Image (cartoon, rainbow, N blue to C red):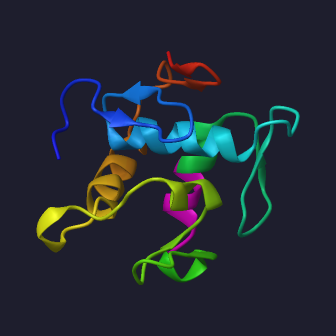
């Protein structure tokens, strides 16, 4: 898995992103399409107006045990059903969730100018 360039593709709409974290934020947006522009935490039901704020909240406030969607192909669990539609198994037995976790931790220190919008990252 390479982390440079637009190589993280959404399998729902074919849009590409330059990091797994940006793809994850995009998948959160897919999860809430038609919901009035708000993003509700699937664990504690806190509402956010930006997908990246929900993303930051989930990875700082909730743990692995809070994931509610089970993959039928492996033992992984996810916070959002849309995550199940993205291949997460990599050759050699590694899975992309480890890359996502690292990217999400990096999001916690994002500058306030980094935002996630419905058309991608600004």
Query: Residue 7, position in %: x, y?
Result: 27, 32
> Residue visible at 20% across and 37% down?
3
Residue 102 to residue 8: above or below: below
Residue projecting furthest to the left = 92
Residue 4 to residue 94: above or below: above
Relative depth, front residue between 105 and 23: 23
Query: Residue 33, position in %: x, y?
Result: 77, 37
> Residue visible at 17% across and 73% down?
93
The secondary structure making up most of the magenta span is helix
> Residue visible at 32% across and 47% down?
103
Horizontal arrangement in the rendering, residue 20 relative to residue 25 (left or right): left
> Residue visible at 50% across and 79% down?
72
> Is residue 11 one of those drawn in magenta?
no
Q: Quadrant of residue 29?
A: top right
Horizontal arrangement in the rendering, residue 27 relative to residue 118 (left or right): left
Write down the region rendered in magenta: 56-63
> Is residue 60 one of those drawn in magenta?
yes
Horizontal arrangement in the rendering, residue 79 relative to residue 33 (left or right): left
Q: In which quarter of the image is residue 106?
A: top left
């Amino acid at each position: 898995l390479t982390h440079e360039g637009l190589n993280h593709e959404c399998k729902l709409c074919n849009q590409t992103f330059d990091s797994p974290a940006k793809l994850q934020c995009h998948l959160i947006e897919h999860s809430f399409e038609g919901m009035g522009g708000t993003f509700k935490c699937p664990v504690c039901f806190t509402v956010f107006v930006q997908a990246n704020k929900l993303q930051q909240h989930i990875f700082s406030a909730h743990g692995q045990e809070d994931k509610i969607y089970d993959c039928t192909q492996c033992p992984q669990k996810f916070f959002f059903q849309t995550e199940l539609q993205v291949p997460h198994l990599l050759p050699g037995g590694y899975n992309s969730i480890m890359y996502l976790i690292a990217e999400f931790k990096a999001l916690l220190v994002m500058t306030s100018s980094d935002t996630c919008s419905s058309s991608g990252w600004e």
